[in-house]
Image (cartoon, rainbow, N blue to C red):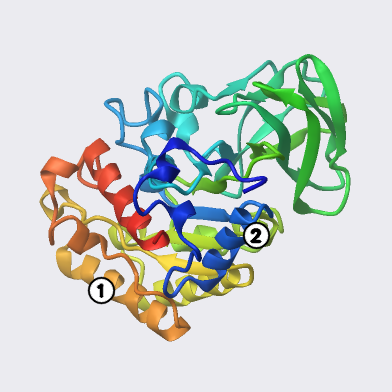
């Protein structure tokens, strides 16, 4: 099948690529995108919208470090999809979330990213939390190491009239110049270059400071489903529907154009006491935004521990029920129930702390999502 990368798992009995027609009940847009990919068309896009659980806090011994990103459920999901015959990749960054708080900085949490002189994690937020910024006149680069040979990079860049120009480089050569001095937005620019094993680097070139959420590396001659981790530590539903700037998370969703958005935003809202009506309205707004480009699969978080000062089970159940009510009202697939997934209450053996799952808990979430998005 030209244009489709077939991994070893794809020949296993029941492998996805051996099926004549990929069709997941209640996820028609996602199913159609996978079929297009299997026929050699564009890659299918799965966006993971969430909080610190999605971002991966607690997946490793030090919370964020070492390499908490590698232990997060979206990355595990991509590996599971590969193993079941659906080529997938998590070679992307969609914001720094809150992982600049990691001991050793963002790169200790995600060693694929190196922040050179003049680059850092900014307080401004865009898709998936905090943005990366390159100061005006900075000499260093933001660099990303892909998971294999690539010849394309989709750069997620903030545009605004006071910003600057940057270059994208591979193997020491400038491959493209990206001017972000234009009306405010989150713009995705696709840069082509000779195949390389990386890294792909972004540098300030002129003008004002530059801001990026990150990007996606890929190969034009192969097709793998993109699993994009937009986890944002500390995020509540209100953070995802803020509209004061078009480059915020809400404004960026159409640019990301997910065929499927998996949304799990409950733990920070129930532990902060967000009113149920407020939460339902906000989730409905986010769902409507995601539905403009594809399907939506909602998920509720794993139970927090009331014995450690977190919300009561009754409060958690109220928001869990709200998620199911929004799904029913919007005609969505039945949500993944985090309470049931973790045994009905706080499951100490699957948890890193009172709120966040450990590696085993992250693996359980990844398998639950995999079971819902594949056949």
Q: Earlier in the sequence, mark 2 or mark 1?
A: 2
Distance between the Cα atoms at labels 2 and 1?
A: 31 Å
How many marks on residues? 2
Query: For this view, does 333 lie left or right of residue 168?
Result: left
Residue labelled with disc 2: 257
Query: For this view, does 148 lie left or right of residue 219?
Result: left
- Where is residue 140 shown, x and y percent of the image? 73, 16
Q: Is residue 215 visible?
A: yes
Q: Is residue 202 visible?
A: no
Q: Quadrant of residue 121?
A: top right
Residue at 80 percent across and 35 percent down: it is 192
Q: Residues within 10 Å of mark 1 (few under 14, many from 20)?
A: few
Residue at 47 percent across and 46 percent down: it is 232
Front-lying residue, 280 or 201: 201
Front-lying residue, 369 or 107: 369
Q: Which mark is residue 318?
A: 1
Residue at 36 percent across and 67 percent down: it is 274
Q: Nearer the viewer, mark 2 or mark 1?
A: 2
Q: Is residue 361 above or below residue 253?
A: above
- Where is residue 105 shown, x and y percent of the image? 49, 23
Q: Are marks 2 and 1 in contact (CB under 8 Å)?
A: no
Residue at 68 percent across and 36 percent down: it is 219
Determine the residue located farthest toward the bottom in the rendered image: 329
Q: Residues within 10 Å of mark 2 (few under 14, many from 20)?
A: some
């Amino acid at each position: 099948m030209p244009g489709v990368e077939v991994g070893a798992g794809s020949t296993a009995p029941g492998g996805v690529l051996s099926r004549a027609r990929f069709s997941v009940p209640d996820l028609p847009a996602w199913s159609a995108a996978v079929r297009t990919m299997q026929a050699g068309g564009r890659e299918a896009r799965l966006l993971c919208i969430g909080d610190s659980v999605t971002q991966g806090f607690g997946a490793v011994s030090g919370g964020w470090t070492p390499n908490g990103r590698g232990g997060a459920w979206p990355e595990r999901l991509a590996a599971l999809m590969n193993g079941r015959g659906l080529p997938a990749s998590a070679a992307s960054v969609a914001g720094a979330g809150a992982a600049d708080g990691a001991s050793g900085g963002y790169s200790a949490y995600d060693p694929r990213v190196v922040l050179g002189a003049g680059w850092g994690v900014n307080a401004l937020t865009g898709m998936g939390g905090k943005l990366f910024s390159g100061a005006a006149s900075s000499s260093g680069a933001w660099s990303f190491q892909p998971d294999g040979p690539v010849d394309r990079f989709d750069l997620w860049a903030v545009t605004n009239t006071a910003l600057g120009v940057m270059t994208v480089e591979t193997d020491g050569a400038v491959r493209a110049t990206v001017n972000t001095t234009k009306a405010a937005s989150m713009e995705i620019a696709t840069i082509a270059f000779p195949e390389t094993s990386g890294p792909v680097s972004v540098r300030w070139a002129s003008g004002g400071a530059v801001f990026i959420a990150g990007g996606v590396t890929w190969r034009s001659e192969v097709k793998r489903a993109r699993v994009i981790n937009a986890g944002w530590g500390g995020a509540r539903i209100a953070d995802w529907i803020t509209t004061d700037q078009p480059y915020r998370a809400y404004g960026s969703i159409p640019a990301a154009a997910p065929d499927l958005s998996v949304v799990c935003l409950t733990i920070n809202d129930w532990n902060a006491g967000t009113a149920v009506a407020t939460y339902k309205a906000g989730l409905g707004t986010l769902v409507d935004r995601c539905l403009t480009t594809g399907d939506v699969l909602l998920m509720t978080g794993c139970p927090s521990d009331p014995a450690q000062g977190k919300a009561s089970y009754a409060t958690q159940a109220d928001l869990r029920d709200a998620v199911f009510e929004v799904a029913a009202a919007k005609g969505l697939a039945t949500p993944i129930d985090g309470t049931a997934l973790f045994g009905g209450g706080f499951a100490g053996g699957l948890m890193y702390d009172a709120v966040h799952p450990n590696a085993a808990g992250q693996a359980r979430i990844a398998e639950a999502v995999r079971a819902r998005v594949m056949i």
